[in-house]
């Protein structure tokens, strides 16, 4: 707490990672909406969009009120919105998840980009299922090496540790997926 001009009290917060803290604050502000959904995150270089559409279609065919966040659209039940980023920033993400919960959505599928993982856009979220599709040499302008890119993708699965019943689905036909499956044990 800081006293300014002897008139006003100002709350001062210090964070070692403001992006991560922002995600947690945004999640709390919107009532931790990811915890009120069956939340499925899909990461990998290729196949995230296809996998998201397939899963959302399966959920809908079973009569489940679902939502989707991804490269092409953001979707709440039957209402679609234009996508701005594969994975939006923490505030937009949590606001959208809150809208899903308020609309009666019970399951949500989301594409999780490596940029979103690295930039902590998903901090504060809890995932019930994490899916890894594959890893190839895209985005090395951002991650610099395949090892760095892999470690970023692997760190997504730390979000599953918040829920003991969470599951990981990993494509072991991909060499990086085989490694990931072995390391997740």
Image (spheres, helix red, strand yellow):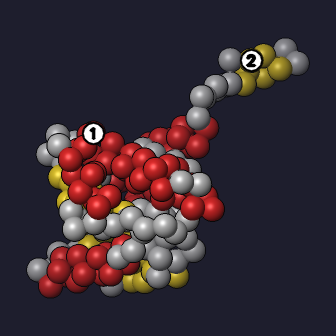
Front one among 90 and 105: 90
* The image quarter in which residue 106 lies: bottom left
Residue where numbered disc 1 is placed: 162
* Residue 21 position in % (x across, y down): 54, 37
Q: State the image coordinates of residue 99 (x, y, percent, origin top left).
A: 41, 65
Q: Quadrant of the N terminus?
A: top right
Query: Does the rendering let one see residue 7?
Result: no
Q: In the rendered image, which residue does mark 2 sit on?
A: 2
Q: Nearer the viewer, mark 1 or mark 2?
A: 1
Q: Which residue corresponds to the image point at 35% horizontal and 76% vertical from the top-left?
A: 47
Q: Position of residue 36 (x, y in %)?
A: 27, 53
The residue depicted at 53 percent of the width and 40 percent of the height is 20
Q: In the rendered view, does 86 fall on the left or right side of 163? A: right
* Above or below 151: residue 100: below
Q: CA distance from mark 1 to mark 2?
A: 34 Å
Where residue 100 appears, x then y in whole percent? Answer: 35, 67
Task: Give the mark nearest the N terminus, 1 or 2.
Answer: 2
Which corner quadrant of the image does residue 44 belong to? bottom left
- Image: 122 above or below 164: below
Q: Looking at the image, is 171 positioned above or below residue 52?
A: above
Q: Residue at x 63, y 26 (%)?
A: 13
In the rendered structure, the answer to whether residue 82 lies left or right of residue 76 reads right
């Amino acid at each position: 707490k800081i006293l300014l001009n002897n008139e006003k009290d100002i709350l001062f917060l210090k964070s070692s990672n403001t992006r991560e803290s922002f995600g947690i604050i945004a999640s709390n502000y919107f009532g931790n909406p990811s915890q009120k959904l069956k939340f499925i995150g899909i990461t990998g270089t290729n196949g995230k969009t296809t996998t998201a559409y397939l899963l959302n279609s399966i959920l809908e065919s079973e009569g489940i009120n679902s939502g989707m966040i991804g490269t092409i659209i953001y979707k709440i039940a039957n209402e679609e919105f234009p996508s701005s980023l594969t994975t939006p920033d923490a505030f937009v993400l949590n606001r959208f998840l809150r809208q899903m919960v308020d609309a009666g959505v019970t399951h949500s599928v989301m594409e999780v980009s490596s940029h979103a993982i690295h930039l902590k856009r998903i901090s504060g979220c809890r995932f019930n299922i994490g899916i890894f599709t594959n890893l190839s040499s895209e985005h090395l302008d951002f991650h610099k090496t395949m090892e760095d890119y892999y470690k970023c993708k692997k760190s997504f699965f730390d979000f599953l540790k918040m829920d003991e019943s969470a599951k990981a689905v990993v494509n072991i036909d991909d060499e990086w997926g085989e490694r990931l499956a072995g390391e997740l044990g």
